[in-house]
Structures are given as C-alpha cells and as structure tokens.
C-alpha cells in the first residue's frame, strides 16, 4: 500500500546505485556526502527510503562530468539481479515475462518515487509497449539518464525472465537528442532509437513476452507480491532531519539503553546541537525517548517470549512495576493483556485511542498510518521504528 509518506522518496538501493556510478566517474564525494539520507545507517538499511532530491542531486553532479547516455548505461550495467531486492524477482519469477513486468509496474514504488515515476504496459495487436512515465523536462539531463536507465533495466529483467536476449523493435526517449548515443545502442542492442518523443518506451513483439518463463515456480509470484506489500508497509521514509533522528534513536535502542550523547555520536553532532535541533522541531529528548520506548516495548511484547522483567531491563526501566505503569499510561492495559490480544485497547480512562504502531499481528494500515502522522504535533509523536 502506497501512502503520501512514500512520495518524494526512493529506495536506498537506488541511492546506493547512484553513489556507485558517481564514484566510478570520479565525482568528488564532498559534493554529495552530506546530503540527507547518506549516513551509513540509513544508506545501508533497505528499510530506509532516501529523499528523491538526494538521488537527483547526485545525478546532477554526475551529468555535469559525463554524458547522461553514459550514466544510464553504467547504472544498468551495475544493476545485477537482486540489486533492487524483491522488485527484481517480481519480473524474473512470474509465469511469463509479461505477467512479471505487470507486477513490477504495480510495485514500482518499492524502488522509485511514486509521485514522479510510473511504469505502464499497453498491448497493441501483436506488440507490447512498455512506458516509463516521468514528467521532468526533456532538456534536464538527470531525468534523461533516469528514463534511459529505467528502460534498460526493464529490458534486462525481461531478458532474464525469458532466459534469452530480448531486443526491442524500437525505443523512444523523452530526451533531447544527444551528440552521441553509442552508449544507448549498447544498452538496448538496437539503433532504432527515437529522441524527443512524447514518452519513453520499449516496444516488443507480444510473442517475446507471453511465452512461459522457463524457471517459473507455481505460487511464487503470490509470495513475492506479499513480500512486496510488506516491504512498502515497513519502509521508513526519510523526509526530514527529525526522520533521521528517529531512525538513529531506534537503532541505538535496538543495541542498548539509549542516551542523548550516544544518539548524538550516531548522528555526528554534539549533544548541545542535538538538543537545539529537537527544540527547533517542537519536540524534546524525553518525549522522543518515551515514544521510542513505547515502540520498542510493544515490539518485544509481540515479537518475543521475554518476561516482563527482562523487557523492563532491556528498555531502561528500573523494574517490571515501572514498565507496567508505563504500558497502562500508554494503552490503558497491562503488558500481559497487550501481549495476549496482539494490539492495544483504549488508553486509560480518557477514552482516547491508544497510539498505533507497527506491531506484529496488526494490519498493513496499522503499520503505515504512523508514518503519515504529523511528527511535529506535540503530544502526537510518530512511533519510532
């Protein structure tokens, strides 16, 4: 399920790919290393979604140095199967390549920004047209590179599914005609490439995409679609500094009882700076720590068989009684009842609903809704994942 929170972000895998290309083209790292989402704990976490603006800036720096056509080829060459996670296997494991690319279109938001990019498939008699939709200007070279790369990626995955090289009948690109396009001829395996077209497309013979995938396994596509849903549901979109802080706090919490200096070190800032930034975002260390503890304890109650005493010790509470008082304050129930029912009931006697969180046993909506809650509203902080 896609929510507004996914908009403006892409998978960390796409960002890692952009950085790989920048390094291979000797783009100085100081031009992009401080961009949002590039800290190792975010960039190397497949659950984190990097701001799309970060990837675009890296592409801008790269296309200043090299032609966009060469960037698109290198990106495709570095995108071996598995680079983009479950999305890759949606295509290569479906009963036919056509079914696979349809699944990939439905779940493109796993890797791309759903607010700017889309994948569409149309059938026209004996031909099938695969379109990558991106509305950026045709003269904007980073967007040209992305469109050309996307088409090359689809072609490679479809060829992997068919277990033979599939060459399109024609390629159209919504891009200004480059001085040279040898890299694109190499990418697509054809010279039949049209530039300055209304849309970016690959056209194949229908027979190329409708034959059975040689290694398809019955039922595997359904399993992969469920995994794709879970990937979207558990994603952590990084839109702001506060998102970065909360992921850092959660990662420290998973290792030990968090302290403000420990989180400040994780974010490479001083404790004083961290407190000032929290104040700028209309929140406090104590409020954020409380939210992190609530989420951490809920996960331990539902995901482990640890005793209440053990969970209290792992969560920074003096004893089980202190933890029980906290759970009662949050959810209006006891830890044992919360563990037994699988989700919280009304909080206290005020009649207000308990804060939601991505606890096991909840629905996909349970896992996604906290992401789109206003993180700056006092008293309504988003649970830290």
Image: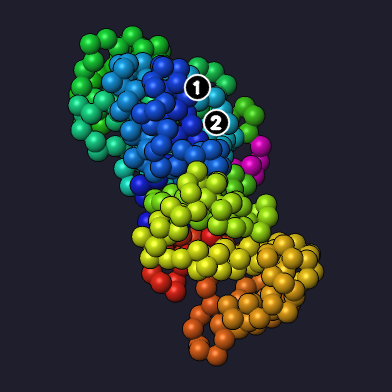
Which residue lies at the image location 31% right of the left edge and 43% below the top edge? 116
Q: Find residue 103 and report its horizontal and vertical position in percent.
A: 49, 42
Q: Residue furthest bottom?
A: 349
Q: Find residue 194 and report its horizontal and vertical position in percent.
A: 25, 19
Q: Reading the chain from its start, which is encountered first: label 2 or label 1?
A: 1
Which residue lies at the image location 68% right of the left edge and 65% below the top edge? 316
Highlighted magenta segment, given as a residue range: 217-222
Q: Report helix, strand or loop for mark 1.
A: loop
In the picture of the structure, the residue carrying the numbered disc 2 is 83
Above or below, 384 against 287 in this view is: above
Above or below, 10 against 271 in this view is: above
Q: Which residue occupies the foreground of this view, 169 or 211?
A: 169
Q: Find residue 360 and report its horizontal and vertical position in percent.
A: 64, 63
Which residue lies at the image location 58% right of the left edge and 31% below the top edge? 82
* Residue 378 visible in the picture: yes
Q: Is residue 219 magenta?
A: yes
In the picture of the structure, the residue carrying the numbered disc 1 is 78
| Quarter of the image where one finds residue 338 | bottom right
Taking 18 as reference, is 171 left or right?
Answer: left
Q: Which residue occupies the foreground of this view, 227 or 305?
A: 305
Distance, label 2 to label 1, CA atoms, is: 8 Å
Sort mark 2 into few (<14), some (14-19) or many (20+) by Cα contacts within 10 Å: some
- Asked if labels 1 and 2 touch by Cβ distance under 8 angstroms, the answer is yes
Q: Report helix, strand or loop for mark 2.
A: loop
Q: Find residue 267 and report its horizontal and vertical position in percent.
A: 50, 46
* Residue 243 visible in the picture: no
Q: Is residue 203 magenta?
A: no
Q: Which residue occupies the foreground of this view, 218 or 379?
A: 379
Which residue lies at the image location 78% right of the left edge and 71% below the top edge? 309
| Quarter of the image where one finds residue 161 | top right
Q: Which residue occupies the foreground of this view, 10 or 167?
A: 10
């Amino acid at each position: 399920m896609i929510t507004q929170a996914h908009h403006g972000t892409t998978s960390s895998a796409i960002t890692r790919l952009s950085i790989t290309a920048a390094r291979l083209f000797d783009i100085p790292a100081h031009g992009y290393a401080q961009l949002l989402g590039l800290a190792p704990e975010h960039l190397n976490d497949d659950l984190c979604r990097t701001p799309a603006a970060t990837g675009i800036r890296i592409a801008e720096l790269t296309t200043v140095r090299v032609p966009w056509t060469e960037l698109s080829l290198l990106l495709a060459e570095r995108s071996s199967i598995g680079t983009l996670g479950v999305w890759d296997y949606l295509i290569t494991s479906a009963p036919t390549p056509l079914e696979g690319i349809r699944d990939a279109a439905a779940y493109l938001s796993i890797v791309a920004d759903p607010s700017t990019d889309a994948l569409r498939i149309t059938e026209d008699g004996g031909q099938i047209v695969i379109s990558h939709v991106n509305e950026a200007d045709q003269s904007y070279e980073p967007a040209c590179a992305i469109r050309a790369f996307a088409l090359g990626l689809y072609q490679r995955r479809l060829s992997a599914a068919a277990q033979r090289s599939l060459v399109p009948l024609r390629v159209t690109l919504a891009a200004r005609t480059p001085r040279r396009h040898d890299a694109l001829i190499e990418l697509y395996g054809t010279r039949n490439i049209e530039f300055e077209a209304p849309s970016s497309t690959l056209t194949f013979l229908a027979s190329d995409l409708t034959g059975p995938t040689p290694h398809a396994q019955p039922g595997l596509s359904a399993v992969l679609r469920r995994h794709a849903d879970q990937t979207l549901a558990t994603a952590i979109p990084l839109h702001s500094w506060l998102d970065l802080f909360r992921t850092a706090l959660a990662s420290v919490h998973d290792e030990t009882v968090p302290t403000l200096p420990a989180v400040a070190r994780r974010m490479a800032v001083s404790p004083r700076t961290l407190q000032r930034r929290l104040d700028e975002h209309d929140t406090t260390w104590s409020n954020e720590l409380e939210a992190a503890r609530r989420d951490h304890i809920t996960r331990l109650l539902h995901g482990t068989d640890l005793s209440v005493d053990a969970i209290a010790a792992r969560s920074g509470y003096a004893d089980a009684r202190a933890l029980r008082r906290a759970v009662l304050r949050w959810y209006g129930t006891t830890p044992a009842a919360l563990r037994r029912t699988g989700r919280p009931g009304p909080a206290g006697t005020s009649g207000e609903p308990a804060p939601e969180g991505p606890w096991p046993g909840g629905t996909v909506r349970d896992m996604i809704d906290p992401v789109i809650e206003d993180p700056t509203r006092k008293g309504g902080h988003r649970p830290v994942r």
